[in-house]
Structure formats: structure tokens, C-alpha cells
């Protein structure tokens, strides 16, 4: 089962923005548990990105993949009023309520396969490749690995772009739900990954239907009840059922996303390796 539902923490102090990407996350101090990197519901990606972060991060933790501690972070109406940047002020005003947070990894740096590949075993790499194919995560590439190294340990971060089916539910039929994930060929760890069939066996044992149900249940009601979600679903129950059904169908046999990952792995093995500069 998942480690636990993410705890709800209260933001007390805005520390600094992290200006990589368009969502303008920030390091925020909390009353209960120190520093977290918070992604805000008022950012351009909206609540759906936070839903992906919570569900995918919870599933990753349930499967034993390395992730920072997750939390739901409450932003009060008064939070950040003294912040001088008008862009940040607008973002915080649009983000009152529950937001998403991941523990701040002090001293962490971006994964670079040219220098830190030995810190991720072939077995772990295979599990991460399998997982990203399962949740259709396009953001684990050489230029944007969303993989941090802290104290010589890897951590998976930034899953807001995963579960992209949620952006067009009317078009997501059974065929699309079970479709392979073609973008897996660009995965930063594909060339270092081990036995994907073995990873498939381990990961499907770890991520079963009760685990999926709990991960979806960890989304607070107020995230389901925003206009962007109500345009797809009449209520929180319908939304939870749709997300859970999608993930449960996707993980059932036969899993085309596993076959696609294995094909991409074999194709990559036949090509000469080249050094790829990490994102700066």
C-alpha cells in the first residue's frame, strides 16, 4: 500500500521562487515540517498538474521508487502579502487553499548520465523506465531528467506532465488507455536500464488495484471541484472513478507500454552511444 496519504501542512513563509519552467514553484517554509518545494494551483498548468503530481508521486512511493516526501500545502489568504514581486503576488492570490509540495532537497543537483549513472542500478533504472511508461510521463529526458541527486541518492521529481490523458478525457477510449507510450524512447535511463520484463513483474506486484484506489483517493475534494475538473466530471466521486479505472485498465495484461519500452531498449542498444550535455 502507499506509504500514507500526503499530510496537510500549513505554509508560513515564502522563501524563494524556482524560476525553471513556467509554473513558478517556490521553496516555502511550513509550520509543521520545514522546507518544501510547492507547486501552486494558480499556475498556468492548473490543478490537473497537481493531481498528476499527487497520484504519480504516491504510486511511485508505493512501488518503492525514490521520491522526496510529499505533502499537501495549505496557502492561507494572508500568505505572501509582503512579497514585492507582483507576478508572485498574483500567483499566490490564485492559489489559496490546498497545493502540492515535495520536500526540499538541500544541496541536490540535476542528474547527469555522464557523471552520475553509477548511482542508479540497472534494476532501478528499469523500474523507473517501466513506471514512466505506465503513467505516460514525457519529462524524464536527457535534457530535462527531473531526477535529482542528493547525498548520492536519486530522487524522482516533477510529475505534473504525466497522466496526459486527463487533458482530453472524451477522447480516451479503451484503445487509447492501453496504448504504448512512444516517447519512452527518449527516456534518460533507457540505455542504462536492465531487465524490463523483470521490472514488469515487480512493479505490477507493487502497484495493484487497492494501491491505485488509495493514490486517487489522496486527492482532496477541493481539487476535484474546480471549474477545470467540473467541466469533465459532475462530482469528485465520478472523477476519482475515472482516474482509477484508467490506471487499472492500463496496468492489466497485455501491457503494450512494456513491449514498446523493450523494443525501444533494443533499438537503442544497436545504436552507438553518444555523450549528451545535461540541461543547465
Image: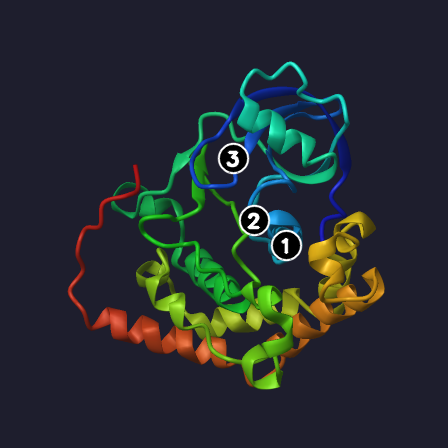
Element type at marker 2? loop
> Please, is residue 262 above or below residue 143 in the view?
below
Q: Secondary structure at mark 1?
A: helix
Residue 185's mark? none
Per the model, the C-alpha gap separating discs 1 and 2 is 7 Å
Q: Is residue 276 left or right of residue 46?
A: left
User: Label 2 belongs to which residue?
Assistant: 45
Q: Is residue 77 above or below residue 209?
A: above
Tag 3's secondary structure? Answer: loop
Residue 1 seen anywhere in this rendered image of the structure: no
x, y (%) of residue 49? 60, 51
Q: Quadrant of the C terminus?
A: top left
Q: To which residue does mark 3 refer?
A: 24
Q: Is residue 103 left or right of residue 240?
A: left
Q: Which residue is mark 1?
A: 48
**Residue at coordinates 66% horizontally, 49% vertically from top-left?**
47
Q: CA distance from mark 3 to mark 1?
A: 16 Å
Neighbours of disc 2 within 10 Å: few (<14), some (14-19), many (20+): some
Residue 68 horizontal/vertical position (percent): 58, 40
**Residue at the (63%, 80%) spot, across then down:** 252
Residue 43 seen from this side: yes
Q: Earlier in the sequence, mark 2 or mark 3?
A: 3
Other residues around mark 3 within 10 Å, as few (<14) / some (14–19) / many (≥20): some
Indicate the quadrant where residue 6 lies.
top right
- Measured from the top left, where is residue 185 in percent x and y? 34, 67
Where does the image place residue 191, in percent across and percent down from the top left?
30, 62
Q: Is residue 260 left or right of residue 100?
A: left
Q: Nearer the viewer, residue 21 or 94?
A: 94
Amino acid at each position: 500500500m502507499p506509504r500514507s496519504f500526503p499530510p496537510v501542512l500549513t505554509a508560513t513563509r515564502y522563501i524563494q521562487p524556482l524560476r525553471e519552467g513556467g509554473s513558478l514553484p517556490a521553496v516555502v517554509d511550513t509550520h509543521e515540517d520545514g522546507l518544501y518545494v510547492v507547486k501552486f494551483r494558480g499556475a498556468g498548468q492548473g490543478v490537473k498538474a497537481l493531481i498528476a503530481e499527487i497520484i504519480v508521486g504516491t504510486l511511485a512511493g508505493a512501488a518503492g521508487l525514490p521520491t522526496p516526501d510529499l505533502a499537501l500545502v495549505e496557502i492561507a489568504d494572508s500568505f505572501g502579502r509582503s512579497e514585492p514581486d507582483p507576478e508572485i503576488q498574483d500567483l499566490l492570490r490564485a492559489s489559496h487553499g490546498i497545493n502540492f509540495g515535495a520536500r526540499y532537497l538541500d544541496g541536490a543537483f540535476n542528474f547527469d548520465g555522464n557523471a552520475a549513472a553509477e548511482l542508479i542500478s540497472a534494476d532501478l533504472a528499469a523500474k523507473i523506465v517501466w513506471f514512466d511508461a505506465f503513467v505516460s510521463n514525457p519529462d524524464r529526458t536527457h535534457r530535462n531528467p527531473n531526477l535529482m541527486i542528493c547525498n548520492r541518492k536519486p530522487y524522482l521529481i516533477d510529475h505534473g506532465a504525466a497522466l496526459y490523458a486527463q487533458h482530453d478525457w472524451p477522447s480516451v477510449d479503451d484503445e487509447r488507455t492501453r496504448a504504448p507510450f512512444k516517447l519512452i524512447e527518449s527516456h534518460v535511463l533507457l540505455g542504462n536500464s536492465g531487465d524490463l520484463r523483470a521490472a514488469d513483474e515487480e512493479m505490477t506486484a507493487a502497484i495493484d488495484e487497492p494501491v491505485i484506489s488509495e493514490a486517487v483517493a489522496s486527492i482532496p475534494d477541493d481539487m476535484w471541484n474546480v471549474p477545470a475538473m467540473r467541466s469533465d466530471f459532475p462530482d469528485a466521486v465520478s472523477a476519482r472513478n475515472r482516474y482509477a479505472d484508467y490506471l487499472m485498465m492500463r496496468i492489466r495484461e497485455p501491457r503494450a507500454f512494456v513491449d514498446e519500452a523493450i523494443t525501444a531498449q533494443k533499438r537503442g542498444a544497436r545504436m552507438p552511444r553518444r555523450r549528451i550535455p545535461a540541461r543547465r
